[in-house]
Structures are given as C-alpha cells and as structure tokens.
C-alpha cells in the first residue's frame, strides 16, 4: 500500500486510543493526517518509541495504546522485542511501517531491508499475535480485529517508499516541540483516563 | 599489591532501599542490573504489587520509565554504570529535550573498593558525565542516606529531568566511603 493509504486507514479507524509516534515518517505523517495535539510525537531516541509505549501501556492498562513504529526504528532496538514479548500487555498494539528504507533521509538504505523478516523476528522473540499486511483493506481488517480482541498485537505493514518527485508535498512541521509535546500529551492522558500525570503544582 | 576488599553485600541495605522506593510511590521497575544492584532488582521482582521488567539493553529502561510517567506510574530504573553509558543519547534526546523525569539507581563503579580493570573507565567518567548532562544525583554511601530517596524522587520531578542515585559499594558492604 502507499504511505498515504496507510496513515489514512489508521486515522479513519482511530477512536481515541493513546497514540505514540516514532520519529520521522510516523510522527510527520500522523500529524499531516490528524493534526492532533493529543498524541506523543517522539522526535528523539530513535528505536525507543517501542520501549516508551511499553512503559505507557503497562502503567495505563485501561487505555489502548497504538504505537506507530517503523522498520528503521525497530532495527535500532531489536532487543526490545524480547522485552515486549516477556510482557505482551493486552492493551499495546505495535504497528510497524515497513518501507524498507529511511524515508525521511530520502530513502537512504536500511540494513538488510530487502530480505529482513520483521514479523519473523517478532515471532522468534516470543510475541504471539503477529501479522503481516500488504493492502489497506488487510490493514483495516487487522486493526478492527485487534481492537476487538483485547490482546497484544504486532502488525508489520508493507508500505511503498515515497519517491520525492516534483509533485511530492512535504509534511507540515509540527508547530510545537519538546516540553509542549510532553504537556499536551500528558494533559490529554489525564483528561482521558482521569488520572494524574503531573502533580498539583504542574510538575 | 592491594587485595580486593571483601565484598559481602548486606541484604538489610537492599531491603531498606526497597522500603524507601515504596515510600517514594514506586510501582513499576525496569532493570538490567550488574551484581551490585542485582539484589534490589530481585527484591522488586518479588513484589506482587510492583510491575517489574527485565530488559535486553539499558536504553530501554530509560524509555520504559519515560512512558510509565505518562501513564501516571512512578517507576524506577536499575542498571550498572556501564549500562548507563549506553543511555546518553536517550537521556539527552528524550528526557532532556522533553523534560521527562525518570528515577534511576545506578551502581557507582570503579572507585577505591572496585579495583577492577573493566571498571576503571567507568570510575573516571560516570559522575563527570552526570554533571555534563546536568543530572541531579545522590551518592548513596551511608545507610542513613537511603531515607532520602522519596525526596530525591520529588526533586527529579521538580527539576523535570532524570535523577540518578549512585549506589556505592561502601553502602552495601559497610566499608569506609571514599566520598
């Protein structure tokens, strides 16, 4: 499927889940299609959005957490698959956009991407519910299924790399950063779950 | 030749650390310990009301504790000084950039009670690295300091950055502190 199909499909199915976006394509494109201030856009720590989302899911078991990850990020934290497999929180849905390159580096090569089996790596780490999808319709069915299942899910979506031709429109920049990402997301979590992320004096 | 001092970790110290973490409100732990901090990780694993994780590499700990912060949980990360060196990028770009507090207990390796060739570099760079990153930290070298952990936890949240508790061998073996 094409990149815009991937993000539009997810955005159409999004129903208030807590969303954590890995840096690069996921953060950029999710902002492009949703303009939502309620998500965590990780413009840092490449590879560790999966660990961040794992900690969030374990700490907030009543919330469904969507992690929008990438094959580049996954490659940087393959050991994290073992940690995720050991926990497999039912409220964590780990989506891996596999475009087989570093898209935000204009398609720079990703190590061994032509043959790497990311779903196979997840299964070998011990993750039980693993799927691969190639078409938007498959993605839609899978997301609907895992939302209904109440079980941990790991989905690898094969997405075409974007070739930046003359018609390419770059995603708009997120108009805020760092601490504001923290406070917008944290306040959203507080409101949605009725919990305290920050103390009575705001820290 | 200087003989290595005897190392007989005192379990009572680890139990006191556990109790102090409880008083700080800790309900989640993520750990990849070395032998100095391993007894604390084991104790946390054994607590039925603490969600505990073992990880494959230390930067995961930093990110797990950061995510847990947004879920309203108080987390502790446990690792060795060598592992902390692997976390610099994540601490700089995730925690310092976004002002996310995490609470870490890290072994203070490479000092006078740790004359081992594979720890000598850590002994020279660990604390200076904390200063370079502008991370508040506490050298835990006497039993009476253990009670400071709840205040240290609040201090890290107030300053919106990682707080590092440096666990010395003097604390867990009762030897004279060099600090």
Image: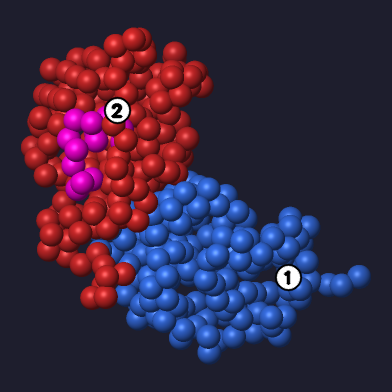
Chain colours: A red, B blue
User: Which circle marks residue B111 in the picture?
Assistant: 1
Q: Quadrant of residue B108?
A: bottom right
Q: CA separation, marks 2 and 1?
A: 51 Å
Q: Is residue B65 left or right of residue B126?
A: left
Q: Quadrant of residue A8?
A: top left
Asked if disc 2 and disc 1 are in contact, CB closer than 8 Å, the reply is no
Task: Quadrant for the C terminus of chain B, please.
Answer: bottom right
B131 up-or-down from B93: above or below? below
B6 up-or-down from B130: above or below? below
Task: Quadrant for the N terminus of chain B, please.
Answer: bottom right
A109 up-or-down from B9: above or below? above
Which element carries disc 2, helix, strand or loop?
A: loop
Q: Main secondary structure of the magenta part?
A: helix
Residue B15 is situated, as x and y percent measured from the top left of the image, at 45, 79
Residue B94 is situated, as x and y percent measured from the top left of the image, at 43, 51
Q: Where is mark 2, residue-wise?
A: A171
Residue B87 is situated, as x and y percent measured from the top left of the image, at 53, 52
Q: Are marks 2 and 1 on the same chain?
A: no
Q: Is residue B159 visible?
A: yes
**Residue at left offset 57%, top offset 71%:** B166
- Depth order, front residue of B41/A94: A94
- Residue furthest to the bottom: B144
**Residue at left offset 31%, top offset 47%:** A176
The mark lying in front, picked from 2 and 1, is: 2
In reply to whether residue A33 is colored magenta, the answer given is yes
In reply to whether residue A174 is colored magenta, the answer given is no
**Residue at left offset 27%, top offset 70%:** A202
Magenta-highlighted residues: A27-39
Q: Quadrant of residue B7?
A: bottom right
User: Which circle marks residue B79 in the picture?
Assistant: none
- Depth order, front residue of B110/A98: A98
């Amino acid at each position: 499927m094409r990149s815009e199909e991937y993000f539009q499909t997810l955005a159409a199915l999004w129903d208030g889940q807590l969303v954590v976006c890995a840096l690069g394509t996921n953060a950029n494109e999710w902002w492009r299609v949703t303009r939502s201030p309620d998500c965590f856009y990780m413009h840092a720590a490449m590879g560790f959005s999966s660990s961040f989302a794992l900690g969030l899911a374990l700490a907030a078991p009543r919330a469904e957490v969507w992690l929008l990850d990438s094959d580049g990020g996954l490659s940087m934290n393959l050991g994290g698959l073992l940690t995720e497999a050991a926990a497999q929180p039912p409220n964590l849905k780990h989506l891996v956009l596999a475009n087989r390159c570093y898209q935000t580096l204009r398609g720079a090569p990703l190590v061994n991407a032509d043959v790497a089996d990311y779903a196979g790596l997840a299964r070998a780490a011990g993750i039980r519910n693993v799927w691969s999808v190639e078409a938007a319709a498959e993605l839609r069915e899978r997301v609907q299924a895992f939302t209904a299942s109440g079980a941990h899910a790991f989905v690898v979506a094969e997405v075409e790399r974007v070739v930046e031709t003359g018609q390419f429109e770059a995603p708009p920049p997120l108009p805020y950063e760092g601490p504001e990402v923290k406070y917008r997301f944290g306040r959203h979590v507080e409101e949605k779950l009725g919990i305290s992320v920050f103390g009575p004096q705001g820290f | 030749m200087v003989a290595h001092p005897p190392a007989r970790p005192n379990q009572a110290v680890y139990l006191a650390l556990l109790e102090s973490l409880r008083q700080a409100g800790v309900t989640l732990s993520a750990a990849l310990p070395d032998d100095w901090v391993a007894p604390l990780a084991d104790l946390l694993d054994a607590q039925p009301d603490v969600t505990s994780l073992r990880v494959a590499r230390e930067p995961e700990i930093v990110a797990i504790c950061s995510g847990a912060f947004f879920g309203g949980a108080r987390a502790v990360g446990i690792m060795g000084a060598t592992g902390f060196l692997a976390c610099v990028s994540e601490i700089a770009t995730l925690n310092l950039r976004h002002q996310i507090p995490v609470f870490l207990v890290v072994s203070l390796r490479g000092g006078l009670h740790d004359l081992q060739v594979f720890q000598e570099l850590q002994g020279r760079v660990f604390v200076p690295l904390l200063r370079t990153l502008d991370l508040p930290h506490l050298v835990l070298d006497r039993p009476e300091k253990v009670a400071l952990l709840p205040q240290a936890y609040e201090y890290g949240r107030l300053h919106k950055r990682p707080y590092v508790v440096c666990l010395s061998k003097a604390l867990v073996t009762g030897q004279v502190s060099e600090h």
